[in-house]
Every structure is written in structure tokens, then in C-alpha cells.
Image (cartoon, grey):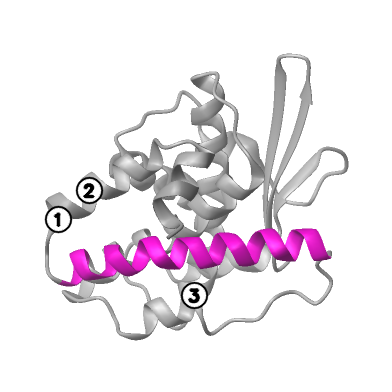
Amino acid sequence: MILKKIQDLLEALYCVESKHNVEDYFAAKQTSGGTSIGNRLGREALLVRQEDLDLQLALFVDAEVMKELKDHDPFSGLGQDNLDSFCTATEGVSHFLYLVSRAEENHPVTCLELELQGEVDKYLLSALLYRHHTGEVPEFLFQYLFEHFSWDPNLEEAEKSRYEKANHLAARFCFHMDECIRHGRWDDTLEAARHFYRLDHWSKLRQLTP
């Protein structure tokens, strides 16, 4: 139930509640059809198919990622043996919850918006879990998520451009969040995170673009 625990944490963070359990949409193998959202490293993807008003979803997370999270429960502690897998799973659950939440409110959503929120959620959940278990956020976390990584060489140019923009914008937002969390300013952290979560695509861009 690791994916549901991630969903529960995101819902608590943002004060949202979905009628849909992400575990019910989990696909052990990638399925054919639909548009893939995510899949930067081929380890997770939210598959989406819309026919009229009917929205069909399936969340794929690589079996090795799920095994690593089962063997090293991130809710008991984050570290070298599970941080990457936790971020991978969190990105997938983030895409799922954000898309479902917007659909339930009958609001449109863009791929850039989903990727941006996914980047933010990976940082916030990792930082909060580290702070909970160790009392501090490790210095390397921000660089690990926003600087020290490589893109999949098989990405198409448009897709890579979207990921790069999402990563760049999320880094701006999370740099501010990093300061709040490190100094224990929880009210400021929650207020800023929840406000940002509810902004639409263009409002997010206006907030993060100088």
C-alpha cells in the first residue's frame, strides 16, 4: 500500500481529498494506448485516455522501484537505498492525484503543470520525511533533485524541453520552501505549498517567472 500512503501524505499536505485510491489504478506493467505523462527515466508513467467525458487512467511504476520501497520502507526512513525509488513513485502518485483533483473540479490541466507539481511534490515529501525522521533536511537533497541528474537520451526534444522547464520552475519554488522547512516555519511552508497547488497553469508561471 506504499502508493496509497504517498497519496495520503500528499492529500494531508494540500488539504485535498480524492474519492479515488491510486492503488486501484496501479498497473504492474505498462499498458498500451493512451497518452503517457511522466516516464522521464522509463520507471513511472501515468497513462491517460479520454473519450468524451470519460477519463481512463493507469499508473505504471517499475517493479524494481516497488520492490525497493517494499524492502526499504521510506516511511520508516529515507536514505541512499530508497530515495530515488521514493521520488519516482511520488512523481507518479503526484501526477495521478493532481489530474484527478482537477478533473473532479472540472478544471483543465496541462502536461507542464503536472510535471511542475510533480517536481515540487518530490522535494516537499522527501524534505518532510527527512525532517521527521532525522530532525533536519540533508544539504544534498536540493542539488540531488534539481541539479545532479541526467536526462534520458531517448527523450524527444519537445518532451525534454517541458521537463527542463518544469525542473527549472520547481527549483525556484522549492528554494524558498527549503528555507522555510530548514528554519521550522511550518505555517509558512503549508500556506505557500497549498496556495501554489491550487493555482492554474498560467498563475503558476506568473508566480515563478521574474
Cβ atoms under marks 1 and 3 closer than 8 Å: no
Say what amino acid the circle numbered 1 marks: Trp
Q: Nearer the viewer, residue 128 or 120?
A: 120
- Residue at x-position 28% and y-position 69%: 178
Residue 76 placed where, x, y %?
31, 66
Circle 2 is placed at which residue position?
A: 190
Residues under labels 1 and 3: Cα distance? 22 Å
Circle 1 is placed at which residue position?
A: 186
Instruction: Characterize the local packing of mark 3: few (<14), some (14-19) or many (20 or more) Cα atoms within 10 angstroms.
Output: some
Vertical position of residue 173 compared to residue 53: above or below: below
Task: Work out which residue is located at the far front of the displayed protein and give it.
Answer: 210
Q: Which badge, 3 or 2, comes first in the chain's sequence?
A: 3
Say what amino acid the circle numbered 3 marks: Phe
Q: Is residue 136 visible?
A: yes
Secondary structure state at the residue bearing disc 2: helix
Instruction: Characterize the local packing of mark 2: few (<14), some (14-19) or many (20 or more) Cα atoms within 10 angstroms.
Output: some
Residues under labels 3 and 2: Cα distance? 21 Å
Cβ atoms under marks 1 and 2 closer than 8 Å: yes
Circle 3 is placed at which residue position?
A: 146
Residue 6 placed where, x, y %?
42, 50
Say left or right for 53 vs 119.
right
- Residue at x-position 45% and y-position 47%: 206
Residue 11 occupies quadrant: top left
Say what amino acid the circle numbered 2 marks: Leu
Vertical position of residue 49 compared to residue 6: above or below: above
Secondary structure state at the residue bearing disc 1: helix
